[in-house]
Amino acid sequence: MTVIIENANIVAADRVITGGSLTVRDGKIMRIDERLPDHLAADAERYDARGMYVYPGFVDLHVHGGNGFDLMDATPEAIDGMCRYHAAHGTTTLLPTTRTASVAAITSALTAANTYMASSQEPLRSLIAGIHLEGPFLALAYRGAQREEELLLPSLPQMKEWLSASGGQIRLVTIAPELDGAESVIRHLREQNIIVSAGHSGATYEDMIRAADWGVQHITHCYNGMRGFHHREPGMLSAAWLDDEVTAELIFDTHHAHPAAAQVLLRMKGLDRVVLITDAVRPAGLPDGKYITEAGHSLTVEAGIVRLPTGSLAGSTLTMNIAVKNAIGQLGLKPYEAARLASLNPARILGLNQRKGSLAPGKDADLVVLNERFEVQRVMSLGHWLEL
């Protein structure tokens, strides 16, 4: 079956093609044209996207849950539910993300994700590119919403157990690199070609320089859960700003980071080294109110902002389509620049940029159709329209 999306504003890698068409066949993008091709396949399904924008499917490296579901529920229903919710908001590739919990609970979540990814009975399994392990190797003073009583010092034997439980599906690990035992864990993860991110960390500038030498190459939700910048102790933030090999996540719901702080990050790192994430948690997509986590902790959502009883932020209710909207509206980015942050950059970090992350002939037909209000109209994954 051939699908032709016509009359669309196609967000290509370096421009927006107005009134263009995009042809999909056998799960791949076959061609992108300035207008409708002269010769159409006899069996072509045509979709008129007049007045709409076609973006590459979004890639979310850091997402815990949504619509009442969470990876830590460790059930196929929960994993399917969170995938379905975020796919409905334009995400076609994601890393379900753990949080600090008991060793047994983390193991169960990793096992459940691996089982889900391997099951032919789960139609959304292809959306998952791996697992993000966030915690429990995090700093007490910068734990944020992570559970204090279950934080652990980095342990290589424990890390190896979790790698095994995940079936080798862990793709990204967040760790506080200043903690005792971090070096051996980081070096082992890099030997396994796993991305290592510094986060929930009080690392100094010197700590981060050392960690980069060990293999840290990414920053978890920049500005949040980390030592801040000071002119006499510039901290891990400054080290990350100045290292061209380090990429940085940004939760741009305008609550986790002020637009000015986001602009500073973009100017320091450039458009190729910043990625938009949601850090979405269970209440994303649900009404304001009080919610209880799988571990019995209370969360309050007010005006879409998730907080602990202490008032601390506890993840977000953000979706990727709104992150892109904010990047364009609040930061003045062009649509194709925002698409770099939401799609191409995270795909590159995962090593998937030859197949995903931008609209180009030969790449996977992962795309999202948005109207001018950034509301999702349709989502395609591997050439198939998703029913969400």
Image (tube, rainbow, N blue to C red):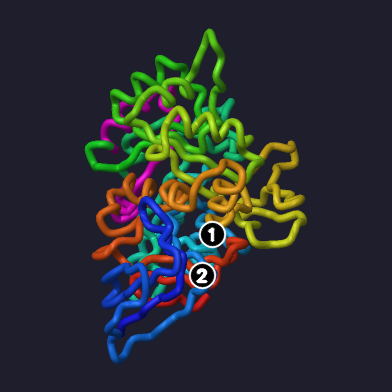
The amino acid beneath tag 1 is Asp
Q: Is residue 81 left or right of residue 190?
A: right
Q: Is residue 79 magenta?
A: no
Q: Is residue 106 visible?
A: no
Q: Is residue 372 left or right of residue 132?
A: right
Neighbour class for label 2 at 10 Å: few (<14), some, many (≥20)? some
| Residue located 51% across and 38% down the image | 221
Residue where numbered disc 2 is placed: 77
| Residue located 77% across and 56% down the image | 289
The amino acid beneath tag 2 is Glu
Q: Is residue 272 left or right of residue 50?
A: left
Asked if the residues shown at circle 2 and circle 1 are in contact, with their CB atoms under 8 angstroms apart, the answer is yes
Question: Closer to the camera, 14 or 34?
Answer: 34
Q: Is residue 171 magenta?
A: yes
Residue where numbered disc 1 is placed: 73
Q: Residue furthest bottom?
A: 42
The magenta segment is: 161-189
Task: Please say if 223 is above or below 233.
Answer: below
